[in-house]
């Protein structure tokens, strides 16, 4: 895995950070940067975030796992899971490179067990653990009552009606008239509960540190956890 191998300069030739090829090409493809040699490039606009970039961005990161130091089977780990970040406002999405760290496959897999546990706890907090199962159940009951009602017992029919009216908080007559059910992603529903994006991001960063005890994570990364979102 290779990353951080291109120098990015500001429009006035000040060093900003080391970035990977994918990020460099993002700027080049949009005519927001020009190459200054066969490896490095400079921006063609005044970046709003220039003054905010701290010491971590200026490090030339090594291609090794930040947890154990291995240089084999390396992967990119998104500290704040992409499933959440894609719902962030643009001003938070733009800071995503800070949260991409290098992990070996073993450390990555081990940490994801902790991450999955936290994800489950977050869904449970907002009663979304069985969101998909409940909607699929509602669709099944709706179809059965509309097309096969005569083949089920009164008791079974009553339980289906009770479930649907409770789920949609609507009289069964109106529910059966609606055939258009959209399966909104569980993460989308969850993110509607998140308003303090700063705290949410910092929570994931601290969770990563607490559950991996990374021995090779630059101290500058930990120092800037709160610095980036100061104020």
Image (cartoon, grey):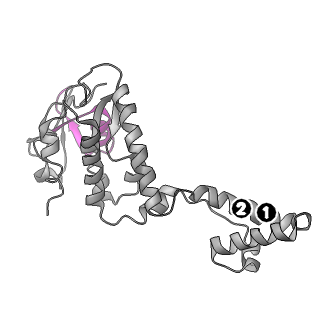
Query: Vertically, is 104 above or below 136?
Result: above
Q: Residue 18: x, y in percent?
A: 18, 35
Q: Is residue 30 left or right of residue 172?
A: left
Q: Quadrant of the N terminus?
A: top left
Disc 1: which residue: 143
Q: Residue 47: x, y in percent?
A: 18, 52
Q: Residue furthest front?
A: 155
What span is in magenta? 17-38
Q: Nearer the viewer, residue 92 or 9?
A: 92
Q: Is residue 17 left or right of residue 123?
A: left
Q: Inspect the magenta stretch and tell me whether residue 148 lies in it.
A: no
Q: Nearer the viewer, residue 76 or 162?
A: 162
Disc 2: which residue: 139
Disc 2 vs disc 1: Cβ atoms closer than 8 Å?
Answer: yes
Q: Residue at x 27, y 36 (%)?
A: 212
Separation of disc 2 and disc 1 at Cα? 6 Å
Q: Residue 61: x, y in percent?
A: 18, 30
Q: Residue 225: x, y in percent?
A: 18, 49
Q: Quadrant of the C terminus?
A: bottom left
Q: Report which quarter residue 170 is drawn in.
A: bottom right
Q: Secondary structure at mark 2?
A: helix
Q: Nearer the viewer, residue 157 or 131?
A: 157
Q: Secondary structure at mark 1?
A: helix
Q: Circle 2: is it few (<14), some (14-19), or many (20+) Cα within 10 Å?
A: some
Query: Vertically, is 196 above or below 92?
Result: below
Q: Report which quarter residue 150 is drawn in.
A: bottom right
Number of numbered tags placed on the structure image: 2
């Amino acid at each position: 895995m290779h990353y951080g191998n291109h120098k990015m300069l500001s429009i006035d030739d000040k060093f900003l950070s080391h970035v990977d090829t994918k990020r460099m090409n993002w700027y080049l493809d949009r005519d927001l940067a020009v190459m200054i040699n066969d490896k490095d490039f400079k921006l063609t606009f005044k970046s709003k975030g220039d003054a905010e970039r701290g010491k971590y961005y200026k490090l030339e990161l090594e291609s090794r796992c930040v947890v154990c130091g291995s240089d084999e089977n390396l992967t990119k780990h998104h500290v704040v899971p992409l499933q959440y970040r894609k719902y962030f406002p643009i001003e938070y999405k733009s800071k995503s490179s800070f949260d991409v760290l290098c992990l070996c496959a073993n450390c990555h897999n081990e940490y994801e067990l902790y991450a999955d546990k936290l994800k489950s706890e977050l869904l449970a907090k907002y009663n979304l653990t069985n969101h998909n199962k409940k909607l699929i159940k509602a669709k099944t009951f709706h179809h059965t009552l509309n097309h096969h009602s005569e083949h089920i017992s009164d008791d079974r029919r009553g339980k289906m009606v009770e479930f649907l009216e409770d789920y949609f908080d609507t009289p069964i007559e109106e529910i059966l008239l609606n055939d258009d059910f959209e399966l909104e992603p569980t993460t989308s529903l969850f993110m509607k509960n998140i308003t303090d994006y700063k705290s949410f991001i910092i929570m994931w960063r601290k969770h990563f540190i607490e559950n991996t005890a990374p021995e090779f994570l630059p101290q500058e990364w930990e120092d800037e956890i709160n610095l980036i979102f100061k104020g």
